[in-house]
Structure formats: structure tokens, C-alpha cells
């Protein structure tokens, strides 16, 4: 798998699996923009400002719990089963959201939608890294994670006509917005059905014949599409196959065998989560409360495009310059720029603040995307999905719960006290400090994973130098 040239098969993997980030970006942006539309009793659901905040917290809680729940199942039952199930959960929950009649119904649907998205992160990142050749793994993973901002830009632009009462009835606009996400999800599901199970997962779980059949099929397809013959494989690894691997074994491995990598991933995830809450997730409120912008969709769309361009443009450098240098550079540069923005916050207009945000997140989006790449490739295969889920849950909880509470309070105090935009600079400083700290940690604890197979970065738990059948496992060689 690692020696294969790029082909149409890999594009199918990218489209079928990677498009989930577009859904997440669409979901987050639409919900953020629809808050006011949900407040009226006649056309919305009669939500209060507290209810809107509660719905956001419920979504985050669902994402965290869904990541942990589905992440464990992904390692246990396979990548394909779970990336089909999690997308189905998201689709059904989004459709049900569009039919919400009461706040309680809406909250329940937001929780289930978050659970589906959280599960997607774990299942998809593991599958992508196990199917993409090592030469391209870094750039593909970073670019795919950065595609969140394609959805964010699309969501921002969609809200412009959907929130215009002259174009769409206010009672239907927000419902249509949720329905559009479900339509996109169904399209992704059609493509995703053709993505195979990870041969690596099949092999370790005692289903080597299925794994070999899938690999042969992929090799034949790639050779036929590219018109070339593939070179042979000489490297082997001995695996003691087991149907299930206890969760206690997985946890013990992550925290005792790889403590430095655990600290690295926690630093990266918490830093990027707080950074985005320091700027993006309070961006609409900042423009509206302090700068009098009524239609923030255009500004958010421009900001989102810069994020995706940054991830796309910088992603190849994670394979060429290397993971450690690029993680350090993107985290430190974006953190320093955010700190400078906080110091000069009172001097910006809506346009210049957006421009500064575009520059900051050109670097930050690549770094944040690489945090997912790091968590998915530096731990053993048996723990991959659960590790992604764990670090995603920690980062999301820190940024999605603590962040909004802090920054919402800063904005509220600033507007009620008449202090102006400079009063929210504290949030920028915290985000900046965490990003710079994450970059420094990456410089010392980062893993040089570029161009290496996943098995050489972190040996599978089932790998044996001197295999022993004492636990009922079977010894088998994998090329």
C-alpha cells in the first residue's frame, strides 16, 4: 500500500472519506449563523440566548462522547463499518433537526449530530492514513482536515439568502439549511460505499485472506490505471493476530509506552482548539457587537477561504520539510500573530481585522490539521482510532466548552461596560500562549514521521519479535 503511485483509487478515498470535514464546517457555520432565526416563537423555536449557548454545548458534548464511543468501536469492529454508521447517524440527526418542533427535540438532535461528527473524526482519520501511501500521507491528511473551511465558506454564503426574509420565509430558512447538510451527506455515502476496509485492520484481526484480496484488487487497479508494473516488497513484520484487544492494554500502551507523544498531542489539540475559539467562534459576535456589521456571512466566507488555502498550500511541506519543523513553525507563527492582534485590537476595522485573521489562520489551519495527522500516525494501529478520539475529545472540550464560556463572558462584559473591543484581548492572549506552547512542545517532542510507514513509526501492539501463543494469538507475517 505504501509503495503505490497516486491514482484514481486514492482520489476516491479522499472524496469519500475526506468530505466529512466539509460537512462539519457547513454544520458549525450554519448553526452559528442561524442563532437569531431560532429565537422567535412564531418562525423559530422560541430559544433564548441561554438556549442557543446550551445547544452549542450539547453539540460539543455529543461530539466528545461520540468520538470516544465510536472510536473504540472503530478499533474493534473495523474502519468501514463505523465510517458508514457514523455518517448515517449524522444524516438522520440532521434531517430530524430540520423537523424540530420544540427546544428539547432540537437539543436532542444537536447531541446526536455531534455524536455522528465526533465518530467520523476517529473512523475517517484512521482509514485515510491506512489507505494513503506514505509519500503522500502528510499532505493528504493536512489538506483533507483543512477542507473543514470549504464547508464553513459554503455555510456562510448559504446563510445570506436563507436569512433574508425577502427571499426565504423565516419559518423555513433555518430548516432548509439543515436539510442541505443531509443532502450532501447522502451524496458522500454513495461514494463511501466503494471505499474498502483497511487491509491493515483486517490482517491484525485475523482476517488476512480478506486483507490480501483487497490489497491485490487495489494493486491491480492502480497498475492498470497508471499503466505501470509495481515493484516487489521485501519488508515484513510478524504479527500475532487477535480478534479483540482489551481497552486496558490500549490505554496502558498509550500512557506508559508513549508518554511524550501523549503530551505532544494534548498540547497540539488544546492549543488549536482554544485558538479557534479565541478568534473564529467569537468572530461573528465581534463584528456585530463592536463593528456594527449586520451581514457577517461575507466576512466569514473570506476568512474561511484563507484557512483552506493555507492548509492546501502548506500541506506538501509536511512531507518535504518535515512534520516537526512545520508543526513548530505554523503553531509559533500563528500564536505570535494572534498575540500582536490582541495588543492592537482597538485599531482594527471589520475589513482589517478580517485581513489579519486571514494571515493568522493561513498558518494556523495547516498546524491544526496536522494535529489530527500527528495523533493518527504516532500510535500503534490497534489504538489509532481511539487515540484520535481521545485527543479530539480533550481538545474539543477545552475549546468548545471552556472557550465559548470565557469569550462569551468577555464580550458580554465589554458591551455592558462600554469598554469596547479591546476588553476581549485577554482571549487572544490565552489562545496565542497555548499555540506558542504547542509549537515549542512540537519542536522538542515531535516525531519525524514523513516518508515512513505507519508500522515503523509505531510498531503494532500485536507485533512480535519472538511470538508466543500463550494468549491464544496466531503468528503471521505481513509484508
Image (cartoon, grey):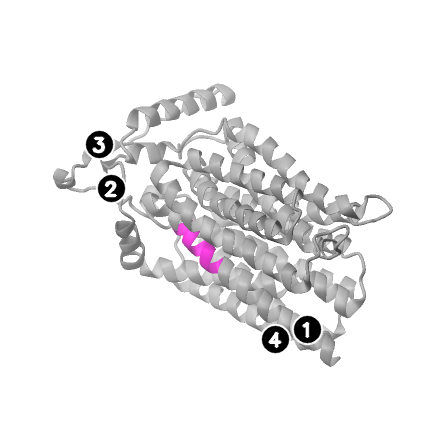
Check disc 4 and report the residue beneath it.
426
Check disc 2 and report the residue beneath it.
462
Label 1 crowd (10 A; few <14 / some 14-19 / many >=20): some
Q: Is label 3 or label 1 in front?
A: 1
Label 4 crowd (10 A; few <14 / some 14-19 / many >=20): some
State yes or no: discs 1 and 4 in contact (Cβ < 8 Å). no
Q: Is label 4 or label 3 in front?
A: 4
Residue 476, label in figure? 3
Q: SS of the residue at dot 2?
A: loop
State yes or no: discs 4 and 3 in contact (Cβ < 8 Å). no
Rendered position, 28 above or below 275:
above
| Label 4 to label 2: alpha-carbon separation | 47 Å
Q: In the image shown, does 111 or 87 lie closer to the viewer?
A: 111
Check disc 1 and report the residue beneath it.
412
Instruction: Identify the residue at horizontal 50%, vertical 49% (top origin).
Output: 318
Q: Earlier in the sequence, mark 2 or mark 1?
A: 1
Residue range highlighted in magenta = 387-395
Amino acid at each position: 500500500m505504501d509503495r503505490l503511485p497516486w491514482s484514481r483509487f486514492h482520489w476516491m478515498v479522499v472524496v469519500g472519506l475526506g468530505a466529512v470535514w466539509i460537512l462539519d464546517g457547513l454544520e458549525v457555520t450554519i448553526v452559528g449563523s442561524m442563532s437569531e432565526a431560532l429565537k422567535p416563537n412564531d418562525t423559530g423555536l422560541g430559544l433564548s440566548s441561554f438556549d442557543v449557548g446550551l445547544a452549542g454545548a450539547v453539540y460539543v458534548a455529543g461530539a466528545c462522547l461520540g468520538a470516544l464511543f465510536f472510536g473504540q468501536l472503530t478499533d474493534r469492529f473495523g474502519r468501514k463499518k463505523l465510517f458508514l454508521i457514523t455518517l448515517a447517524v449524522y444524516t438522520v440527526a440532521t434531517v430530524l433537526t430540520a423537523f424540530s418542533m420544540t427546544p428539547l427535540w432540537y437539543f436532542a438532535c444537536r447531541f446526536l449530530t455531534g455524536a455522528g461528527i465526533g465518530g467520523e473524526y476517529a473512523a475517517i482519520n484512521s482509514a485515510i492514513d491506512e489507505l494513503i501511501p506514505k509519500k503522500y500521507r502528510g499532505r493528504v491528511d493536512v489538506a483533507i482536515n483543512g477542507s473543514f473551511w470549504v464547508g464553513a465558506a459554503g455555510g456562510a454564503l448559504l446563510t445570506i439568502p436563507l436569512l433574508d426574509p425577502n427571499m426565504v420565509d423565516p419559518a423555513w430558512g433555518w430548516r432548509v439549511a439543515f436539510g442541505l447538510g443531509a443532502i450532501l451527506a447522502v451524496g458522500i455515502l454513495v461514494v463511501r460505499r466503494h471505499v474498502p476496509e483497511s487491509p491493515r485492520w483486517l490482517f491484525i484481526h485475523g482476517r488476512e485472506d480478506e486483507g490480501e484480496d483487497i490489497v491485490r484488487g487495489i494493486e491491480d487497479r492502480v497498475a492498470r490505471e497508471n499503466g505501470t508494473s509495481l515493484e516487489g516488497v521485501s519488508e515484513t513484520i510478524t504479527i500475532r493476530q487477535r480478534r479483540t484487544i482489551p481497552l486496558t492494554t490500549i490505554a496502558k500502551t498509550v500512557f506508559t509506552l508513549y508518554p511524550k507523544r501523549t503530551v505532544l498531542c494534548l498540547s497540539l489539540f488544546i492549543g488549536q482548539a482554544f485558538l479557534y475559539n479565541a478568534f473564529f467562534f467569537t468572530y461573528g459576535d465581534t463584528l456585530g457587537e463592536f463593528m456594527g456589521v449586520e451581514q457577517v456571512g461575507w466576512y466569514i466566507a473570506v476568512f474561511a477561504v484563507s484557512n483552506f488555502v493555507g492548509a492546501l498550500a502548506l500541506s506538501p511541506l509536511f512531507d518535504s520539510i518535515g512534520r516537526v519543523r512545520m508543526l513548530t513553525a505554523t503553531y509559533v507563527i500563528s500564536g505570535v500573530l494572534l498575540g500582536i492582534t490582541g495588543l492592537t485590537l482597538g485599531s482594527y476595522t471589520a475589513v482589517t481585522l478580517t485581513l489579519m485573521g486571514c494571515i493568522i489562520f493561513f498558518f494556523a489551519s495547516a498546524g491544526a490539521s496536522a494535529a489530527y495527522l500527528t495523533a493518527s500516525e504516532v500510535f500503534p494501529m490497534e489504538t489509532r482510532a481511539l487515540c484520535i478520539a481521545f485527543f479530539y475529545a480533550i481538545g474539543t472540550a477545552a475549546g468548545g466548552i471552556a472557550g465559548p464560556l470565557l469569550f462569551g463572558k468577555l464580550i458580554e462584559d465589554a458591551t455592558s461596560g462600554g469598554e469596547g473591543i479591546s476588553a476581549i484581548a485577554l482571549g487572544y492572549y490565552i489562545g496565542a500562549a497555548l499555540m506558542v506552547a504547542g509549537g515549542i512542545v512540537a519542536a522538542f517532542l515531535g516525531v519525524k514521521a514523513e516518508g515512513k510507514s505507519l508500522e515503523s513509526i509505531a510498531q503494532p501492539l500485536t507485533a512480535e519479535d519472538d511470538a508466543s501463543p500463550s494468549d491464544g494469538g496466531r503468528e503471521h507475517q505481513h509484508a
